Image (tube, helix red, strand yellow):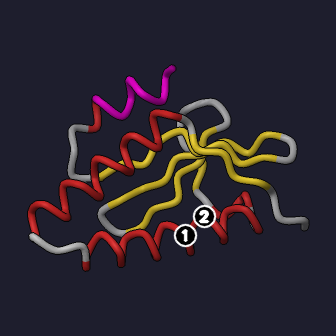
Amino acid sequence: MAKKSVVWTETAIKQRREILKYWTIRNKSTNYAEKLIVLINERIKLISQNPDVGKPTNHLDTREAAMGNFSIYYKNIDTQIIITAFWDNRQDPKKLLKLLKK
C-alpha cells in the first residue's frame, strides 16, 4: 500500500500545540514534549503507511490511534489522512464528542 499524505486540521494543530505547551510549562523543560513529538511522528508515519491501523470509532469514517494518554483521531480519505483531533485522554470525553461531530 502506498504511503498517504497527512493533513492536520486547524483544530488538531491547536490541540497538539496546547498539549506540548502545557507539558513544557508544567515540567519546566522541553524533554517530555520532545519525546511526545517523536511518538506523534512515529504514529503518524504508521498511520500513513497503514490507514486501517487505528480502531474504528462511533463517528463516521473516524479512526482512533491510541498512544498511552493521548489519541490521534483521523479520517482516511482517498489519498490523504486527515488528522481531526489530537486528544489527551484524561480530558472530559464530552468535549471530544463535540469535536468529532463537527
With respect to residue 98, does 27 lie above or below? below
Which span is picked out in magenta? 95-102
Magenta region includes residue 89: no
Spatial separation of the CA atoms under disc 1 and disc 2: 5 Å
Q: 4 left or right of 60?
A: right
Instruction: Please identify the dominant SS of the magenta region.
Output: helix
Residue 25 x, y percent position in the rendering: 12, 60
Q: Kindly identify which numbered label has been placed on residue 28.
A: none
Disc 2 designates what residue? Answer: 44
Q: Please tell me which residue is depicted at 36% across the width and 34% down the height of the picture.
A: 96
Residue closest to the eye, 99 or 37? 37
* Amino acid at dot 1: Asn
Residue closest to the eye, 97 or 18? 18
Q: Quadrant of the N terminus?
A: bottom right
With respect to residue 24, does 94 lie above or below? above
* Mark 2 surroundings: few (<14), some (14-19) or many (≥20) residues within 10 A: many
With respect to residue 22, does 92 lie above or below? above
* Mark 1 surroundings: few (<14), some (14-19) or many (≥20) residues within 10 A: few
Q: 13 left or right of 26?
A: right
Residue 13 x, y percent position in the rendering: 46, 44
Q: Secondary structure at mark 2?
A: helix
Q: Please tell me which residue is depicted at 28% across the width and 37% down the height of the picture.
A: 93
Single out the residue that lies furthest toward the right: 1
* Amino acid at dot 2: Ile
Q: Are marks 1 and 2 in contact (CB under 8 Å)?
A: yes
Quadrant of the image occupied by residue 57: top right
Q: Please tell me which residue is depicted at 36% across the width and 78% down the height of the picture.
A: 35
Residue 54 x, y percent position in the rendering: 60, 59
Q: 26 left or right of 96?
A: left
Residue closest to the eye, 58 or 5? 5
Q: Secondary structure at mark 1?
A: helix
Disc 1 designates what residue? Answer: 41
